[in-house]
Image: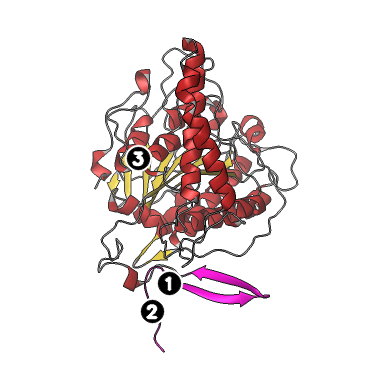
Amino acid sequence: MSMNMNRRRVLRGMMNGVAITVGVPFLDCFLNTSGDALASGQELPVCFGTWVQGLGFNPGYWEPKVIGHGYEQNVQFEQLKPFTKKVNIFSGMKVFLDGRSAKPHTTGYEVCSMGDIPVQSGSPPSIDSIVADAIGTRTRFRSLEVSADGATGSWSRRSATAINPSEPSPVALYKRIFGPEFKDPNAADFQPDPQDMARRSVLSFVTDQRQELMAGLGAADKARMDEYFTALRGIEGQLDLQLQKPAPMPSCNVPKATEQARVGADVNDALANGKLHAELLAHALACGQTRIINFSFSGSGGGSLIRIPGSSQNFHQWTHEEGIDPKLGYQPNCTFLMDKCLTGFVNMLAALDNIKEGDRTLLDRMLMYYFTDNGYARLHTLDNMPIITAGLANGRIKGGYHIQAVGDPVTRVGLTCMQVLGVPTASWGTYSNDTRKPFTEIMA
């Protein structure tokens, strides 16, 4: 008996008396002959993610020796070798202070993520929020944030007061993504949740009263209420999505419920939970639940609190207190933790690359933006900042380049990412960190 094969096909069965459906991955018959779009001609949706690691790497040990295409990984980036063709490494760039004082383990993150050093309570949106406005408005989750070290902080934000907290628990993340509210995008039947319909109608009623309410308010109150109703409109948009049948996502395959390691700063626990987070985020992207992810392996609150097993000192403390080994030429315990952080990033790339979509993988339509807080954490330097992009963004960006841009602002990489992803902007950053120069040599 032949099976009707199309991109809405699901596998159905029974588990302990309960009906289940499992989406099938992208097969060749779902895609065009080149494997880079659906058979209908529709482009596979591009996705974006940020990766934050505190305290960077050792200068001289991570920068490739060759500039341009076809570089070889330096000793501290050897773990990236399997992904070199999909990875770009940027060296030599810096954060400009313009006479302002640097906040240790904070200012570097701020400029890399927001293009700005916020003054007082002001804070522009982070790059992921800007990208989400362009590609993330039609998904269940505008973005998903996680941390591997037990922290709940995040560098993802809409403003100084609208910060997206990270989820440190893979179990909680699983329930959030694939719990009762998850709607299989490949399921044949779709029934909107009556509670969603009720909430939507209530919000519509509130919105209908807007003009009457606003008419009697002063300028300051009107501004506050406008911000309030803007937030309500965002909620309405998300509820509207709950009332619509999701677009089919043939690569969607709901993972099994996960068990987490201890949530905390022990680097082995962080790696174990980080790997689970990576797999869940990859499945969330494959199932069309979001197009934006933000992963803080360490440093969501500045510096890094991860620890070597059995040690009471954290990574941040080691950078200040550990001497340089005269034979090795670097701080050995710090370097051990740097390598473990990079392992976490490699696990994220592997999770994306393991989801096959025709002749390609999820990493091929993903763009990951790696940044950190210091060029050399021991001295709190803000020059020669290690920055990485990974993924090919549906062929919109080239991979396999080492770009050296000595003295240029780090914001050039963020601007490149935004333009590659279709954000309509010609510049990014403030003061000396403002740039209008994307890296066009890697833009396809």
Give SS at disc 2: loop
Q: Which mark is residue 4?
A: 2
Q: In this rendering, which labeled residue sits more in front, label 2 or label 3?
A: 2
Residue at position x 32%, y 37% from top? Answer: 423
Mark pair 3, 1: CA separation: 34 Å
Q: What kind of residue is marked 2?
A: Asn
- According to the picture, the residue beneath numbered tag 1 turns out to be 9
Q: Residues within 10 Å of mark 2 (few under 14, many from 20)?
A: few
What residue lies at 45% left-to-right and 57% top-to-bottom?
A: 245
The mark that comes first in sequence, 2 or 3, is: 2
Rounded to the nearest angstrom, the CA distance separating label 1 from label 2 is: 8 Å
Q: Can you tell which of label 3 and label 1 is closer to the viewer?
A: 1
Asked if the residues shown at circle 3 and circle 1 are in contact, with their CB atoms under 8 angstroms apart, the answer is: no
Question: Is residue 374 among what the camera can see?
Answer: no
Above or below, 288 against 372 in this view is below
Q: Residues within 10 Å of mark 3 (few under 14, many from 20)?
A: many
Q: Are marks 2 and 3 in contact (CB under 8 Å)?
A: no
Q: Residue at x 65, y 39 (%)?
A: 151
SS state under label 1:
loop
Residue 49 visible in the snapshot:
yes
Circle 1 packing at 10 Å, graded few (<14), some (14-19), many (20+), is many
Q: Is residue 8 magenta?
A: yes
Q: Which residue is mark 3?
A: 417
Q: Earlier in the sequence, mark 1 or mark 2?
A: 2
Mark 3 or mark 1, which has the lower sequence index? 1
SS assignment at label 3: helix
